[in-house]
Image (cartoon, grey):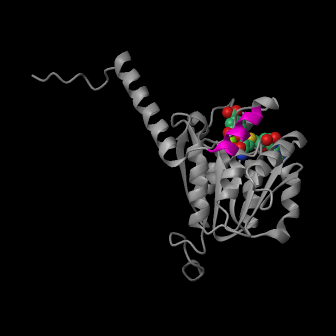
Amino acid sequence: MTTEPPQDAQPSVDELRAEHEQRAFIDRRLAEMFAPEDEAQRAALAALDANSMPHISISPVEGRLLQVLAAACGAKKILEIGALSGYSGIWLARALPKGGRLISLEVSEKHARVARESLVRARLGDRAEVRVGPAEVSLGTLVTEAPFDLIFIDADKPGYPTYLDWALRLTRPGSIIVADNTVRGGGVLADPLPEGATPDTRALAEYNRRVANDPHLLAVALPIDEGGTDGFTIAVVLESFAGAPSAETQA
Ligand code: SAH
Ligand code: DHB
Ligand code: MG
């Protein structure tokens, strides 16, 4: 006779609360230990309310992850799509070596101004610039400035598949392509998607599907934000892919 509860027993309210507190503790300590914010980063977030802008910046740990990835690929040129108030831009620009460049694309004139102010406040005005206009247009002007070592996609969600097309053109083997909001509560992972799926959901699902299956990319999606319900898709551009048939074996 065992005292184990049956396998399908629902967790109690106390168990759920304990689990929630454990997650909150882990999130808080990881942010404190690995991603403490300074005055300039706090000011970039404060600028959101001051300018009636939405609270949709990346988290501190996500900012730190972008820096780890930038350092890992020796990034000297970084492209960001979606600046908002410059919060993620501060994390990215700080990962650059002397002489490095961050270009951030932003459709809103107001957001671009606020982002520039944040970057200047962080003393990054010499290495970071914000270009105003729809990214789908600006991207076409960047060919002469490519390849970028890291591209961070975080703008309008229906644009993600187009941004991936451009990212593949504007990178080199060894470059890293990161996209935010690709987990989105799990709805974008449903297969098949429900009939009523929104354009955002469809585009994010397509983004993940393409990145996961492209033989020129080595990729993973990680739930790292909002209690593990949203996160990044991270892809490295490969020279050649060991898992793909070579030209010879295809003959
Ligand atoms: N990366 C920022 C958050 C970006 S929020 C941070 O973490 O700090 C998304 C931003 O994308 C908004 O500022 C929005 O104005 C911008 N955006 C939306 N559609 C766009 C488009 N077509 N081209 C460029 N930027 C766009
Ligand atoms: C939302 C969050 C984001 O990170 C983003 O880029 C766009 C929208 C949101 O929660 O609505
Ligand atoms: Mg985002």
Compared with residue 57, is residue 131 higher up or lower down, i.e. above or below?
Answer: below
Task: Report which quarter residue 17 is drawn in.
Answer: top left
**Where's the C terminus, which quadrant?**
bottom right
Q: Is residue 117 left or right of residue 164?
A: right
Q: Residue furthest left?
A: 1
The span picked out in magenta is 38-48
Question: Quadrant of the rendered structure where residue 59 is?
Answer: top right
Residue 42 x, y percent position in the rendering: 67, 39
The image shows residue 1 at horizontal and vertical percentages of: 9, 22
Give the left or right position of residue 1, taking residue 129 as reference. Answer: left
**Quadrant location, ligand no. 2:** top right
Looking at the image, residue 203 sits to the left or right of residue 114; the answer is left
Does the magenta run of residues contain 63?
no
* Magenta-colored segment: predominant secondary structure: helix
Instruction: Please indicate, yes or no, whether residue 145 appears anywhere in the rendered image.
Output: yes
Q: Is residue 203 visible?
A: no
The residue located at (38%, 16%) in the rendering is 13
Q: Is residue 3 above or below residue 210?
A: above
Count of numbered circles on the image: 0
The percent position of residue 90, horizontal first and vertical second, equals: 70, 51
In front here: 56 or 178?
A: 56
Q: Residue furthest bottom?
A: 248
Q: Depth check: 242 or 96 in front?
A: 96
Q: Residue at x 63, y 32 (%)?
A: 194
The residue shown at (76%, 66%) is 169
Foreground of the two, 102 or 197: 102
- Closer to us: 31 or 17: 31
Residue under the image location 70 percent in, 37 percent down = 45
* Percent coordinates x, y for residue 233 in the rendering: 60, 51
Q: Is residue 47 magenta?
A: yes
